[in-house]
Amino acid sequence: MVDISAFLDKVEKPARYTGGEWGSIIKDPASVDVRFAFCFPDTYEVGMSHLGMKILYGLLNARSDTYCERIFAPWVDMEQLMRQNGVPLFSNETHSSAGDFDILGFTLQYEMSYTNIVNMLDLAGIAAFSENREGVFVCAGGPCAFNPEPIADLIDFFVIGEGEEVIGEVIDAYKTWKKSGEPRRAFLERIARLDGVYVPQFYEVSYNGDGTLASFTPNNENAKRKITKRIVHDLNKAYYPTEFIVPYIDIVHDRIMLELFRGCIRGCRFCQAGIIYRPVRERSRDRLLALANALIKHTGYEEISLTSLSSSDYTMLGELCGGLLDVTEKQNINLALPSLRIDNFSLELMEKIQKVRKSGLTFAPEAGTQRMRDVLNKNITEEDITKSTRLAFENGYSGVKLYFMTGLPTETDEDVLGIASLATLVADQYFAVPREQRAKGLSITVSTSCFVPKPHTPFQWAAQDSVTELMRKQKLLQGAIRQRAVKYNWHEASVSYLEGVFARGDRRLAKVLVAAQKSGCKFDSWHDFYSFERWLGVFAECGADPDFYTVRHRSYDELLPWEHIDSGVSKQFMVSENERAMRGETTPNCRENCSGCGAASFGGGVCVD
């Protein structure tokens, strides 16, 4: 156990590190067989907002033989004091050193957190490269694990897909191995046989003269040629916590999160989550109401957020909101519904979600022209956008946030300028409402992110725009927005460029990440610490060309670094969708017509819906 009391008063937010929050679980580490640390490679405030951590924390601690604790990346003030005082990375619950655990499990939510993983291992005194590691095992999972290769040399094993079932199988295998006295490698061989587990050291990689991948071959009889993702088939029977840890300080999402369903019916071609979480699986209204009541009782939160990739697509949304309001109105609890689809936004739904207090409205048209929205398969029209925003303005809203992307495949300057035109059209809907009916203070926020082609999407072969081109498009759009009520925010182009490097990278990037951490790179998603110039220096030092992973178009027959990971959606489907995108053809959503993507196999032959 480490002692931080001597310098805890010298850090900005001591409650990030003290532990002891309401709902946290304390066990005697000596009384369990397996100690597992859920490691989040960002600050406490970000990590404590992550639903996956809440689920696995409760699930593992429900086992009498296992103790799961939390470890977050310490903020720079705390890290400096830890290094000065020789204090290693530690857990929140018992302040145990990370090296005292059996398994450290990192969640991979965002590629720009990779340097924090390296930094946390360094703080823990644990070897960065798995081949040099002894004692504790380091695993990883989450959406970025669907291309594990950029950090494959740093991780002992990956969990691909949803973890609720497979994590228990891993724990059971660890207990058996621990009692056997077998060498470290034997544990990895045991779990390599499990569906959804990938052990990188059991595969050999070779490259062509042009740098592309030549082969990817198992070197161990226990290793599968394809690692198929794990999913939970029945969400009603799946574990979901009825108690959340309630922090002492504000966190990013400080509220009850109620997961409606997993997967998405829509098939937006840029969206990795829409692919890797297929097929759609819903929780029942009754199950959600029971969870909501239990969480209200145990947390005292004043807001419930209904979460999913597209919450307004939940088939029982009206009935669910009605049932929740019977409870929340009496207790003055707000009901928030993010992830609204602009084409099924209704007055009835709006009235329900604003009964306690009015939340802001956010819509994601993604592109400014119909041609570009068809390329993306958004399946929304300009009429959908104007109708929904007019409805909102007629019913007391004066603020709308609109999210778009720039740098999309086939995008032209006309498509970029279309974003400004669409924002003006939305403003026109406000002024079309009679003055006496309007809420005061029109505010339209236009935000653009930079498109990053992701693995396991129809756009995985696309070239990414250069930093220079992305910045040019941002300036073009900025100059075109002249409506005073419209505010424009944009994402830093060079950050998206680096995200693109690691999104579609291969094993040769692990050495780049380690060198980057040594040069001072960490918290790369935080503007105050990010340095593109430092990163460019690291790439040059390592002899790596970042353009190879970003601005280069891939052919369909190129072996991609993530092709040994099976998302359940066929390559044939993604090629077909990419070709349809280039022709500007849309594909119906899964409820209208099954497009034969392959994910139905996870539901016993039919998509679970």
Image: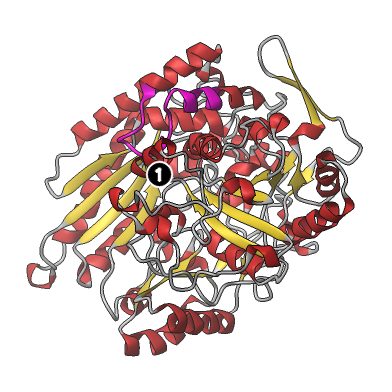
| Image x and y of residue 52, in percent | 56, 59
Taking depth in this image into account, of 29 and 478 the one nearest to the observer is: 29
Query: From the viewer's perspective, is 408 left or right of 427?
Result: right
Residue at 11 percent across and 68 percent down: it is 434
Vertical placement of residue 530 versus 193, above or below:
above
Residue 520 in magenta?
Answer: yes
Viewer can see residue 520: yes
Q: Quadrant of residue 219?
A: top right
Specify whether residue 573 is painted magenta. Answer: no
Residue sticking out furthest to the left: 436
Q: Is residue 401 above or below residue 374?
A: below
| Residue 433 shown left or right of residue 269 in the figure | left
Residue at (23%, 42%) from the top-left corner? 488
Q: Position of residue 562 (x, y in %)?
A: 68, 35
Q: Report the magenta residues as a range.
A: 512-532
Q: Which residue is drawn at 65% across and 59% down?
A: 593
Left/right placement of residue 529 relative to residue 108 reads left
Image quadrant where one finds the C terminus: bottom right
- Type of residue at label 1? Gln
Q: Which of the image's four quarters has the N terminus?
A: bottom right
Q: Residues within 10 Å of mark 1 (few under 14, many from 20)?
A: some
Tag 1 residue? 370
Question: Element type at marker 1?
Answer: helix
Most common secondary structure along the magenta stretch: loop
* Residue 458 drawn at (x, y percent): 60, 39
Q: Outermost residue toward the top? A: 209
Q: Tell me if I can see residue 407 in this picture.
A: no
